[in-house]
Amino acid sequence: MVEDSDLDLLYEEFPELEGKNIIIEKEVLAHFGLLFSGYALLEAGLQNCFIFWKLCSRVKDRSVSDGEQWKLLYDSFEHKAQASTFGALLRLLEDCTPLLVQQDELKLLKRKRDYFAHHFFREENKNMFSSEVKILLISRMNVLRRRVKASEEKVDVATLEILKDLYPKTDVIKMIDGLADDLKSQAMANPPTHFGWEKY
């Protein structure tokens, strides 16, 4: 059910939707992409959470003896995380204490993600014949996108909690900001000439 407040929020965030010259079909596609990019950020957050949760567990059980072993474990966990589907990541994180309260919401969002990945264009095609219905469709996607964003933020908080446990004497936020600055500098110094999908 679409609430008036949902539409008000949609128009507040995207005032161009009230313009006279919009092509509403393109807006549906744009908001589909915006929602799916939110899911991609949530998935990346889950990958990071898994990597550091596993590393933290290994540090606590004293199975990490030196920096070389740390690097090997990091690479192994990163590979496993990146090779996992969204659902597999959730299963890998079932024992992650900082995420326990979020598990039911993440499972629900996963089911909704699967709908968008596998059914949306076929199932919602019947709703593409009315501008009013297309606006309602966009509004409901926007509500879900905000829910996905809220979960992404909670996953980030859980990961930060794990990192603080791993590095108790370090300003973790400052460390992350420094790493982000380094990555940005590297990207600007060596801009890509090819993109990931082009190797397939």
Image (spheres, helix red, strand yellow):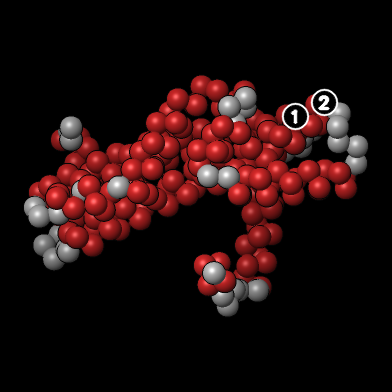
Q: Nearer the viewer, residue 62 or 164?
A: 62
Query: What percent of the width, then of the height, locates residue 14?
Result: 26, 52
Residue placed furthest toward the bottom: 193
Residue 16 seen in render: no
Q: Nearer the viewer, residue 177 or 166?
A: 166
The circle on residue 57 is 1
Give the quadrant of residue 143.
top left
The circle on residue 118 is none
Element under disc 2: loop
Give the quadrant of residue 19.
bottom left
Q: Between marks 2 and 1, how big is the CA–CA gap?
A: 6 Å
Q: Residue at x 44, y 31 (%)?
A: 107
Q: Residue at x 67, y 66 (%)?
A: 186
**Position of the N terminus by quadrant:** top left
Query: What percent of the width, then of the height, locates residue 72?
Result: 81, 47
* Residue 63 horizontal side relative to residue 116, left or right: right
Mark 1 is surrounded, within 10 Å at the Cα level, by few (under 14), some (14 to 19) or many (20 or more) other residues, namely some
* Residue 5 horizontal side relative to residue 77, left or right: left
Mark 2 is surrounded, within 10 Å at the Cα level, by few (under 14), some (14 to 19) or many (20 or more) other residues, namely few
Would you say the residues marked 2 and 1 are in contact, meaning their CB atoms lie under 8 Å apart? yes
Residue placed furthest toward the right: 65
Query: What percent of the width, then of the height, locates residue 130?
Result: 8, 52
Q: Identify residue for label 2.
A: 61
Q: Residue at x 82, y 43 (%)?
A: 70
Q: Amino acid at mark 2?
A: Asp
Query: What percent of the width, then of the height, locates residue 38?
Result: 42, 47
Q: Amino acid at mark 1?
A: Ser
* Residue 41 horizontal side relative to residue 147, left or right: right
* Residue 58 horizontal side relative to residue 173, left or right: right
Q: How many marks?
A: 2
